[in-house]
Amino acid sequence: MANQKNKVQKKTATKNVSAPAKPVVPAGNIPLIPGVSVIIPMYNSARYIRSCVESVLNQTFREFEIICVDDCSTDETVKIVLEMAQQDRRIRLVRHAKNSGAASEPRNTGMRMSRGKYIAFLDSDDMYTPTALAELITIGEKWQADVVHTEQVYFPENQIIDVTPQTKFTTFSKEKGGFCKEPMLETDNLAKRVQMFYQGRFFGWVHNKMYRRDYIMEKNLRFDNLLTSEDIVFYFKVVCTAPRIVRVPNIIYIYRHNPNSITRKMVSIEASLHALTHLMIEGSKVLDDFMQQYEFFVKNPNYRQLPIDYIIQQHLIWTQRFYDKYTPAQLDVLVRKELGKYCGDFVPFFAYIYSAIHTYRQRLINYDKEVKELKAKLGALPSAVVK
């Protein structure tokens, strides 16, 4: 799977969150229009949330608001944030009445409540580097950017992190093609952008970027109710609609390996298969519905297929693990049960297609392995024998 970090909210997702979110702590002395609204979705984040919020409070840029959106935590998360909010009025705590099952609704709530000129997303187990907001704001203002698209930092779980302005960070990214050496304005050609997204140049993390709030509201961009990879779908919409995307080499985000991340702790094969199949089916529909609104995609179906192909390929890679560990009989029961939620009377056909794709993919993997082994053997032969 493309490794965006989707935090496990609960094993069972509630599809509709109808109860309105209610502020618990008043905004206090926050500027009428903060420079940036930092949105932090939370669910049972007690282990990390203090250092997460402190990394924002310790920014060299001071004109911000922090919107912590709790999705019905059952641990000490809310208590910790309440204590911090009493000390700093820039922290706003919002609590959902029902657990939404994913990060989408908390992020949407945060965007609705935001007042900053810019919006930034911070996962509750991650942190910012001390000058992150200052760097992003400076670039955003100088380039009049709708999106500032920057790099990500990686730290392994349990590593002691000494975060100071002098800290030397190590980059980690899934993006392909290398990064720019200085700020650059990305192309506004939609065809090229879609190709770049498909090729991995516009990877869909939302947290290593900053967004102009007016642009987000004007385009009515929201996170869709997907169980995983909702950020990839969201960012594809950004790639298609943002007039000015500025790419920068700055390192601003500290990504911590959380064992409770859905991409690292699949609670069961049933839950995993449900999340991945849900993305492929529902995510494809969301993308297709979005593209249907644009003449470019209607007239260019080849480009319309690229983002759908991207998310399906990425998540077929993850479901392949099941096909390596379970017997066909075991998987057949699980796949039919999962597809039954979507395919009705056509389950036998789609179950066959689902399994056939994996079988074909495994053949390609094995074929590639055999070719590499053969090339290695040929390379080891004396040149005279090869001739």
Image (cartoon, helix red, strand yellow):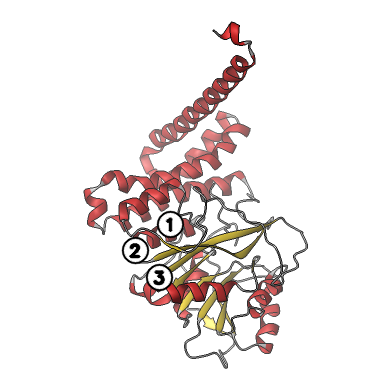
Q: Is residue 85 above or below residue 144?
A: below
In terms of depth relative to the viewer, which is nearer, 283 or 120?
Answer: 120
Residue holding disc 3:
146
Counting residues from the start of the chain, the first of labels 2 and 3 encountered is 3
348 vs 296, left or right, is right
Give the SS element for disc 2.
Answer: helix
Give the SS element for disc 3.
Answer: loop
- Tell me the mark number nearer the camera, choosing from 1 and 3: 3
Residue holding disc 2:
241
Counting residues from the start of the chain, the first of labels 1 and 3 encountered is 3
- Tell me the mark number nearer the camera, choosing from 2 and 3: 3
Residue holding disc 1:
233
Q: Which mark is residue 265?
A: none
Counting from the top left corner in percent of width and height, residue 162 is at 75, 68
How far apart marks 2 and 1 lie (CA) works out to 13 Å
Q: Is residue 116 visible?
A: yes
